[in-house]
Amino acid sequence: MVAVVQRVRESFWAVPTLLCVAAAVLALVLVEVDRALLGVQVLEGVDVLYRVGADGSRSLLSAIAGSVLAAASTTFSITIAVLALTSSAFGPRLVRNFMADRVNQAALGTFLATFLYSLLVLRAIRTISGTETDEAFVPHIAVNVAMLLAIVSIATLVWFIHHISDSIQVWTLARRVRGELRRTIDDLYPDRRGTGEERAEPELADPGPVTLRVRSDDAGYVLTVALDDLVHHAEEHDVLVRLRVRPGDFVVEGQELAHVHGTVRDAEDLVGCVRPAVVLAPSRNPAQDVGFAVQLLLDMLARALSPGTNDPYTARTALDDLSDGLAAMARRSRPPERHTDDDGTVRVVAPTIRLPELLETVVDTVRAYGLPHPDVVVRTVRLIGQVADDADRADLPALGAQLDVLLDHHARTQPYPRDRERVLAAAEEARASLPATPAL
């Protein structure tokens, strides 16, 4: 269900379909209202209504339908061109951000809905023997609403062009991904350190040997894990479930998803409960996968530093947004890996991603692509220092080790003395928050 919801949210057809359905209902309702008010004198005094005969209404509705359909075609073409540009310049995984953009979906839906509305109202116009008589039926209210929708479509087109021009700018892309990263961190790491909200890991006795291995019946990325459902099912079967995967991992068919400890009375039923709780999808999503949001920014960094692009400024922008997200994560308490039932018994053990793992991914990417660019190396060193300022003491040795790895690899490139001095000066500032570590 979660995978389906994500696919619907990131599709171009969902919002336009809803708007088209609403337009069809509106057209049918207004036509019926016009029929019900036919001959009622109150309408004769409504000067705001634009009244033309059957032929004039047909011409007007035809013009509106043709114009908005052309605008919809233009909108679709522009969107596809932007998707191709974004995919080649910043990485194909950022395409999902454009597909999930509500403005793009709403603009396309507005044009299609106006087109469909105009067609349905157009078919309701009736004349007798090709001449306009008192028996001719023209739904004046519906025709006037079509004019209003045409005006809305014009405004939407201007709004869409402005939005799409802004959305392809690098800082806009980076800000969106940073927003996803912060939302994921807020969801997965809600507790702040130093506020008394920290939750200690519950005690876990020796669970004993593995009595059941739950294997995947499909391949894909772990999208989400329904921990509450797992705790409920583990309590029902009086067992301990230890997950072997976490959101973001790629699972092949037949791979172990979880180990079960304890007496298993109904293995088939338990497998049927555990397996659906680990939701697989063809692609990753930042819903529970904080590493994916980090990877999106790293994709921007790697593309910017490729020989064909050579844009270290964009790479620094990506590092700025990474530092904001990772520093926010450093201020949060580690989410528990052990999850208990209402009686306090540990029922599920689920691995979580740690801050040093994400920082290691950042440093590895910079080592692979950014060492020839002193500004990028300096910014990465400062990122480590910014994260270390608020990081848990248990994570500081790992952060210091990553700093040493980066400095060691940068020194091996034999940089100019001036560049080396800048990197070392930034490293000295970063080390103020780190424990002393031996040089590599």
Image (cartoon, rainbow, N blue to C red):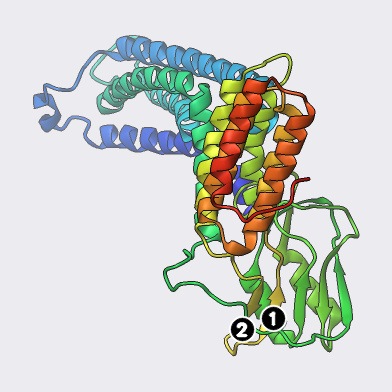
- Give the image location of residue 216, x and y in percent: 85, 61
Q: Is residue 16 visible?
A: no
Q: Where is residue 313 in the image (x, y as percent from the top left)?
A: 56, 22
Say which residue appears at 83% left-offset and 73% top-offset.
259
Q: Name the residue under label 2.
A: 341
Q: Nearer the viewer, residue 304 or 282?
A: 304
Mark 2 and mark 1: Cα distance apart in space: 7 Å
Task: Categorize mark 1 by other alpha carbons within 10 Å: few (<14), some (14-19), many (20+).
Answer: many
Disc 1, SS: strand
Q: Left or right: where does residue 147 sit relative to residue 262?
A: left
Query: Where's the N terminus, which quadrant?
Result: bottom right
Q: Mark 1 points at which residue?
A: 347
Q: Earlier in the sequence, mark 2 or mark 1?
A: 2
The amino acid marked with disc number 1 is: Arg
Q: Name the residue nearer the viewer: 119 or 204.
A: 204
Question: In this view, which residue lies farthest toward the left?
Answer: 45
Q: Do the residues labelled 2 and 1 touch (CB within 8 Å)?
A: yes
